[in-house]
Amino acid sequence: MTDGLGRSDDRLLRGLDPQQREAVLTDAAPLAIVASAGSGKTMVL
């Protein structure tokens, strides 16, 4: 991801597990995020 100046912005991806990272970076649409409480859905959205 990049900011308006074209710099890499990994802050948004830091701390995400591989499945969360995949959900954030996918181009698929529409996308349903289904997971249990406390799994990080809000962070992904």
Image: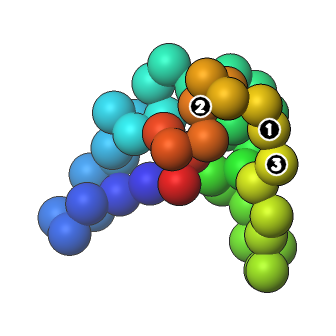
Q: Is residue 42 left or right of residue 19?
A: left
Verify CB contact (< 8 Å) between mark 2 and mark 3: no
Query: Residue shown at 20%/69% (left/top)?
Result: 4
Verify CB contact (< 8 Å) between mark 2 and mark 1: yes
Query: Residue shown at 79%/69% (left/top)?
Result: 31
Tell me residue 24's x, y (percent).
62, 52
Extreme left residue here? 5
Q: Secondary structure at mark 2?
A: loop
**Which residue is tagged 3?**
34
Which residue type carries mark 1?
Answer: Ala
How many numbered markers are drawn?
A: 3
Q: Secondary structure at mark 1?
A: loop
Query: Which of the two residues, 4 or 13, is positioned nearer the viewer here?
Result: 13
Query: Residue shown at 50%/19% (left/top)?
Result: 15
Extreme bottom residue here? 30
Query: Residue shown at 82%/48% (left/top)?
Result: 34
Verify CB contact (< 8 Å) between mark 1 and mark 3: yes
The answer for how far apart the CA atoms under marks 2 and 3 are is 10 Å
Query: Which of the two residues, 17 or 4, is positioned nearer the viewer here?
Result: 17
Q: Secondary structure at mark 3?
A: loop
Tell me which label, 2 or 1, sits earlier in the chain.
Answer: 1
**Which residue is tagged 2?**
40
The answer for how far apart the CA atoms under marks 2 and 1 are is 8 Å
- Give the numbered dot on residue 35: 1
Quadrant of the rendered structure where residue 20 is?
top right
Q: Is residue 25 left or right of residue 2?
A: right
- Give the numbered dot on residue 16: none
Q: Residues within 10 Å of mark 1 (few under 14, many from 20)?
A: few
Above or below 2: residue 12: above
Which residue type carries mark 2?
Answer: Gly
Tell me residue 19's x, y (percent).
79, 33
